[in-house]
Image: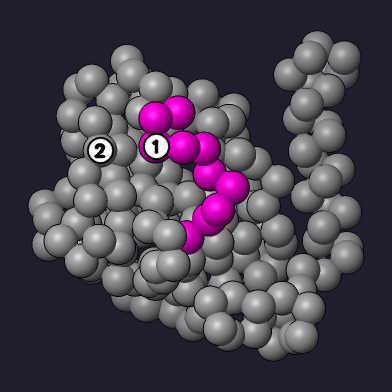
Amino acid sequence: MKWTDSTNTVTLYTGDTGFEAGTKTLIISTHGGLSGSFTKPYPCVIKFATPKGSALCASLLDAINGNVTESEIAIGGKIKSDDYDLAYFEHDPSSRRIESALAGNTDYDVLTLMPNKSSKLSTILTWLNSWKLKYVGILCLFCRVTGNDDDYTFIGRRVKHVLQPNRMQVLSTAIALELKAKGLVH
């Protein structure tokens, strides 16, 4: 099942059990770029699937299937957290594939942005709060790049290209996790 907000900016997906913010983790799958900080509108745990300053190496379907672990957590109640400019991620699976992956899934709901739309993490959490969808766990599935550089354009705004050491760290971690999942290392 999916739902699109009245501004046609976000789409929320859920499995057969419906939107149960109190028992599920919300996966936010978008492009992302660091843009300051904000105070969370309600107590929740924000988890990130990639280290700060790094590109993302995980897919939405991997996350839905429980094969993505967080690399950093912003814990606590109404405390400050990093804010991110978010934009539509063109490499997400189709709506049909997302809905199919969530069928029977009781652990996750998914939020994506519509094509050519952008927002901020702080705005998304404010909307969730106003919609009475206070997810206690949020898994951010987006890049966490910072700065200003000609190499990377983000919805008309330039953000710093991912640093080579961070990219290598993320790739090394991804390879190690894949080898472990295949039982080739312990």
Residue 7 placed where, x, y %? Answer: 20, 66
Residue 73 placed where, x, y %? Answer: 51, 53
Residue shown at 77%/38% (left/top)? 174
- Which quadrant of the figure has residue 137? top left
Say above or below: 177 vs 184.
below
Name the kind of residue labelled 2 in the image: Lys
Q: Tags 1 and 2 in contact by the CB under 8 Å rule?
A: yes
Residue shown at 64%/84% (left/top)? 158
- Residue of label 2: 2
Label 2, residues with CA under 10 Å away: few <14, some 14-19, many ≥20: some
Res 78 visible: no
Closer-to-camera residue (78/89): 89
Horizontal side of residue 5 vs 48, given as left or right:
left
Closer-to-camera residue (29/67): 29
Res 14 visible: yes
Horizontal side of residue 147 vs 30, given as left or right:
right
Residue 130 in magenta stretch: no
The label on residue 30 is: none
Count the marks: how many? 2
For mark 1, give the secondary structure.
helix
Horizontal side of residue 185 vs 63, given as left or right:
right
**Real-space Cα distance between discs 1 and 2?**
8 Å
Name the kind of residue labelled 1 in the image: Ser
Residue 91 placed where, x, y %? Answer: 59, 47
The magenta span reads 88-97
- Residue of label 1: 95
Quadrant containing the N terminus is: top left
